[in-house]
Image: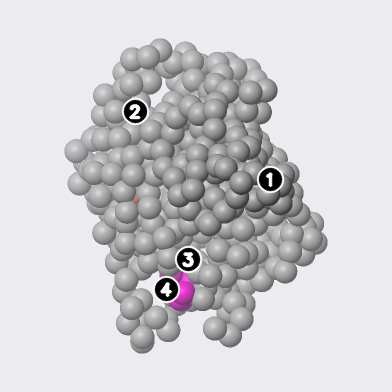
Amino acid sequence: MNGSSALVDNAGASQSRRVFWDQDVYQLELERIFSRCWLMLGHDSLVPKPGDFITTYMAEDRVILSRQPDGSLKAFINSCTHRGNQICHADSGSAKAFVCNYHGWVFGQDGSLVDVPMEERCYHSDLDKSKLGLAPIRVETYKGFIFGCHDPEAPSLEDYLGDFCWYLDTIWDGPDGGLELVGPPLKSTLACNWKVPTENFVGDGYHVGWTHAAALQMIGGELAGLSGNRADMPFDDLGLQFTMRHGHGFGLIDNAATAIHVKRDGYVKYLEQTRGGIREKFGPERERLYVGHWNTSIFPNCSFLYGTNTFKIWHPRGPHEIEVWTYTMVPKNADTETKRSIQREAIRSFGTAGTLESDDGENMSSATYNNNGIITRKGRMNSSMGKDREGPHPVYPGIVGVSFIGETSYRGFYRFWQEILDAPDWAAIRANDDTWDAMWTNRNFW
Ligand code: UNU
Ligand code: FES
Ligand code: FE
């Protein structure tokens, strides 16, 4: 590969198809994106008590996330410092220690090496256990959501989320207690590049009426009008699209929070009961967000649909495959029946065999695997929709696009993807902080 700079054009409006296919692009992503960004690990609700742990992935690295006796969190690489074996094979549990299968080295809840079989006889006091703990990972949380990062130079999680915090607070920090994750996750594999679902969730309003035509027609409700891109669809009034400094973004469909839920009574009632508190705490602009539906990605590989409340981590498995982990996001303080119905509906629509999930899967594989053709692969992809109909907004932070159906947040995602791929370190990225949004030319759109 000849550098990475031609992969995405300056406007973010076209990409080389090699971004979905090439092994060397993928290796660069592992080094420069997955080794340097904050990656989603889970939520406090998955490890509530001291000793609780889950195992997960940061890209292809296995990690253990463990709740400490003092209530804090630690994460470390799930691979023995002796001969490299995976240490913990459980998905989740509660443990005082982690014992390696191979030779029996014992690691504490904090990842430190606490015991070695026959240590005196075998090592004659030569083994410095204090230097052989499991490799630690930075952990920070935002409103209960837990992230990990390998790069000591990376900004704090709050700086990394940046302007997106203003939006996330609406749903993650409401006066009723915000949201939590319900696990364990559904797991499946999908033959696609990890960016195909991420870009789809960050801003593909365009596919909804077409790819999901049958499902939307069957479900009815607020989105039935999108089915088959009906001519009377209120295109410009559907909602907005948003993109942030570090590639995070979402699309908003107004008043459609629960549109994908078939049995909506409990959740509709919950939102009606709580929207007043949101208005009081955050104002009418964010009350609008609270009752809307969001399709969202947090850079690089975590996506969720607020309202539908499916929550995804797209773990990469090479350039052409992912492991999809699907949790459900529920209001922490809703009653049990409402939580259950939200989980049921989220899984029915966007679980592994969900009605809408399976609509998307075929496209995601096809958009990836078509590039096995050598001529096909040399082409480019287009994400120019609405490129002059976006800009800084008087109220909403980041860059705002005029319609839910646009590609503003595609461009934001791929601009940052290119920037971080080119940047030697976080200092080089920070140097662009004051000028990043100048790239959007239409400064006076709003
Ligand atoms: O499929 C999606 N990403 C989607 C579905 C987005 C918004 C509404 C419904
Ligand atoms: Fe968009 Fe074919 S029409 S990928
Ligand atoms: Fe979809």
Q: Quadrant of the N terminus?
A: bottom right
Magenta includes 247?
A: no
Residue on which disc 4 sits: 21
Quick one: label 4 or label 2, which is nearer the N terminus? Answer: 4
Residue on which disc 1 sits: 129
Quick one: label 4 or label 1, which is nearer the N terminus? Answer: 4
Report the amino acid beneath label 3: Ser
Residue on which disc 3 sits: 383
Report the amino acid beneath label 4: Trp
Residue 335 in view in this figure: yes
For the residues carrying marks 3 and 2, which lies nearer the camera in this image?
Answer: 2
CB under 8 Å between discs 4 and 2 = no
Q: Secondary structure at mark 3?
A: loop
How far apart are labels 1 and 3 at the CA level? 53 Å
Q: Is mark 2 within 8 Å of ligand 1?
A: no
Magenta includes 19?
A: yes
How far apart are labels 4 and 3 at the CA level? 18 Å
From the viewer's perspective, is 152 left or right of 403?
right
Q: What number is the disc on residue 348?
A: none
